[in-house]
Image (cartoon, rainbow, N blue to C red):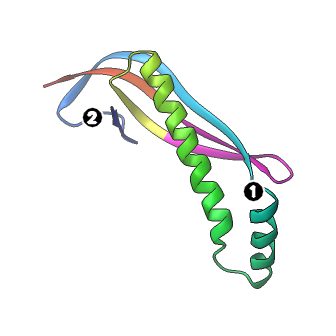
């Protein structure tokens, strides 16, 4: 499946819009990562424990979005984006979304 942040796919034309597809994940850092990350945050700088949680959440949300697109019969997702919002203290919602489309090679 082609996935792009653009509004079109090079060499193809959109022949049908299937609607918005999304993947939503709510993640927390967990006790171990939260503790180690909290200690590292005292010194400032890059915190690999928090970065790992963010990357895992984005990948999971992305995978769910692709599954949603496959369910609706999409051949591509255009205008792909991520969004993140703090859901509760220590928990973050990560949303991956885009427009599912059918395409034709030109």
Residue 50: image location, x then y, percent: 68, 64
Mark 2 touches mark 1? (CB < 8 Å):
no
Outermost left residue: 106
Residue 2 in the image: above or below residue 47: above
Left/right of residue 101 with respect to residue 92 in the rendered view: left
Most common SS among magenta residues: strand
Please check the rendered image and state whether residue 40 is part of the magenta-colored stretch, yes or no. no
Residue 99 is tagged as: none
Residue 103: image location, x then y, percent: 26, 22
Residue 29 is tagged as: 1
Q: Which quadrant: the C terminus?
A: top left
Q: How many residues crowd mark 1 within 10 Å: few (<14), some (14–19), many (20+)?
A: some
Q: Residue at x 30, y 33 (%)?
A: 8
Give the mark nearer the N terminus: 2 vs 1.
2
Outermost bottom residue: 43
Residue 45 in the image: above or below residue 72: below
Q: Which quadrant: the N terminus?
A: top left
Place residue 37 in its image quadrant. Answer: bottom right
Q: Which residues are magenta?
A: 81-98
Residue 9 is tagged as: 2
Please check the rendered image and state whether residue 87 is part of the magenta-colored stretch, yes or no. yes
| Residue 98, visible in the rendered structure | no
């Amino acid at each position: 499946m082609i996935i792009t942040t653009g509004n079109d796919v090079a060499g193809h034309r959109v022949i049908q819009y299937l609607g918005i597809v999304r993947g939503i994940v709510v993640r927390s850092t967990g006790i171990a990562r939260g503790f180690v990350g909290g200690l590292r945050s005292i010194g400032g700088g890059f915190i690999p424990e928090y970065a790992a949680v963010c990357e895992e959440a984005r990948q999971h949300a992305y995978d769910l979005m692709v599954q949603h697109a496959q369910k609706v019969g999409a051949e591509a997702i255009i205008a792909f984006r991520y969004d993140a919002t703090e859901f509760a203290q220590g928990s973050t919602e990560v949303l991956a979304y885009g427009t599912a489309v059918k395409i034709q090679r030109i």
